[in-house]
Image (cartoon, rainbow, N blue to C red):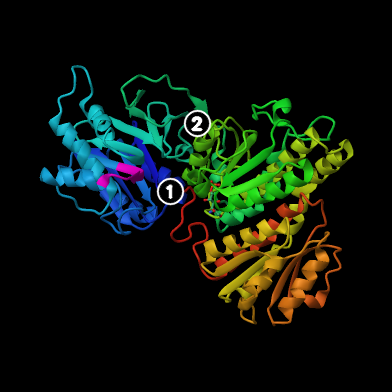
Amino acid sequence: MCGIFAYVGRQKAGGILLEGLKRLEYRGYDSAGLAVADKDKLRVIKKKGRVEVVAAKARRARLQAVMGISHTRWATHGDVNDTNAHPHLSDDSKIALVHNGVIENYASIKKFLESRNCSFQSQTDTEVLASLIAYHYAKEQPEEGKNRFLESVRKSLHHVEGAYGIAVICADYPNEIVGARKGSPLVLGVGNGENMISSDVSAFAGRTQNVVYLDDGQVVLITRDDFSVTTMMDESVQPVINRVDWEIEESVLGTFSHYMEKEIFEQPTSLENTMRGRFSDDGSTAKFGGLNIAARDLRQIDRILFCACGTAWHACLVAEYLIERFARLPVEVDYASEFRYRNAPLDKNTLVFVISQSGETIDTLEALRESKRKGFRTLAFTNVVGSTIARETDGGIYQHAGPEIGVASTKAFTSQILLAAMVALYLGRLRDLSFNDGTEIVKALKKTPGLVSQILDQADKIKAIAEKYADSRDFLFLGRQLMFPLALEGALKLKEISYLHAEGYPAAEMKHGPLALIGPECPTVFIAPKGEIFKKNLANIQEIKARKGPIIAITSTGSDFPEDLADDIIFIPQSHECVTPILAAIPLQLLAYYIARHRGCDVDKPRNLAKSVTVE
Ligand code: M6R
């Protein structure tokens, strides 16, 4: 949550900061702002609303400075208004600071500073830290040869509890920016005659591909031509420069109306990329480069625990079904936020698997850390290369789905399911799954991108169905077995971008309560592909029809679905059971997208949400 971006170089900083900030807007968009060092004064421009609002103000200000910090906010402390927008200035206007995270002990620090006649403008925890740095800066004489500005930041952070990724500037040091992280991500971008700090590498697009992923407890000082990384105890750190190999075009909207739409339509390619080079030469199993765990050790695993949040948690539920089916290994799925405080007793041969698109979700990260602390072997699926989870897990598999900008997860979800199917296949082949079953699954998985394209070709039909139901206030999403997580995902997708009430249930559970919602005003999206329990699904649909509930059915071609049973039918191709969840996801995504679009919602930036949830 919240995106921060800082730049020091030879070019005017204003435009560069705003361009970087636009790429970070998916992290929060309640307000935006920037601060630059102009001669020996700090100038702050900030405003409630989107980056473009601040951009208009900044253009009028004709900023000349070649360094500055910027921020796009997802509010934690204090209302969404101009005053609470970042950057925050210290009481003496010497220090400006942007922050991503939560300073838990801000109230006691504030009290201390107030007792020293410091006053505050905003309700934020961040302003308190700006003034704490200014307090130390004014009061302390650093040791000979030490940078006073840097030392005042370090000193202040020793008093801070909570999580932060920060970038700080000081009026007396117009060529230097200090950054630090604990619990919130921070990356250093190493350019040519310019250096940058950001919450995420996407802000560096077009400027540099050389990045240093900072670890918790590290402090960075950047100037135009140099940078240094140290610990909170001032020990020097040898930075490792990584090369990011994404293309800028990948994060550009092109002819699509929204990133969500673009990302839905990218799925044939993203799925292809997720699979590329990951099947064995004999075509009977999957292979992964980064697991860091030998097949012999994987055979000793008795149980897998999956942890994640939101859509990634739904992908875990799909993984549970598939791994139990193919590998006959017991799987448990927990919300990362619950697991981390639950102190769950786990069998010693448990493998902990986390899934996170961003690799920065704080609850998932902490679940991973808690598992590692207890000595469990950990694995992860992440999409963002170099993210904190990717770096801290014992082993992992990158999704290679490409940057996902829309807040609603789409292509990342289907790539997570695909990887779940591949891991299930791999584990199955280590146990009882036959060569023939393995080759059948591999063949089916390889066909997935083509089948997804066939569903995308029906976008116009799905749009018409979406618009027919777009005025309904409540929706029910039902499915059984592998389609149950898809029902949850369909409901989540709809509610997060269209603000309509939607609930997902295992189909048979509807009789235990949700059926009371049913009536002509409440449509049900029923996911009923061909399979063992198809007839049971038809019976449930009859029960809804008997109560005059409209039905939008998602079923497979050739499933003998009685045409008069549903008000609208969307067909997905008949496929192997491990592919069907991916196929079912596509119409659900399109339905949610077109409903939200029809209702005039801000699809890519739904209210109150952010792409990467880095606060608890
Ligand atoms: O980056 P992560 O996969 O860890 O994110 C987890 C959830 O915050 C995320 O899936 C969220 O539920 C999506 N906005 C749903 O579309």
- 214 shown above or below 333: above
In the image, 111: left or right of 194? left
Q: Are marks 1 and 2 in contact (CB under 8 Å)?
A: no
Going by the numbered disc 2, the residue's amino acid type is: Gln
Instruction: Tell me the mark number nearer the camera, choosing from 1 and 2.
Output: 1
Measure how far apart labels 1 and 2 are at the Cα level.
31 Å
228 vs 477, nearest the viewer: 477
Going by the numbered disc 1, the residue's amino acid type is: Glu
Magenta stretch holds residue 102: yes
* Mark 1 nearby-residue class (10 Å; few <14, some 14–19, many ≥20): few
- Give the image location of residue 52, x and y in percent: 38, 54
- Give the image location of residue 68, x and y in percent: 30, 38
- Give the image location of residue 211, x and y in percent: 47, 29
Query: Which residue corresponds to mark 1?
Result: 616
The residue lying at 82 percent from left, 29 percent from top is 281
160 vs 154, nearest the viewer: 160
Magenta segment, prevailing SS (helix, strand or loop): strand
Magenta stretch holds residue 410: no
In the rendered structure, find residue 209 and report the number of the disc placed on it.
Answer: 2
Label 2 within 8 A of ligand 1 by Cβ: no
Specify start and end residues of the magenta stretch as a single range. 98-106
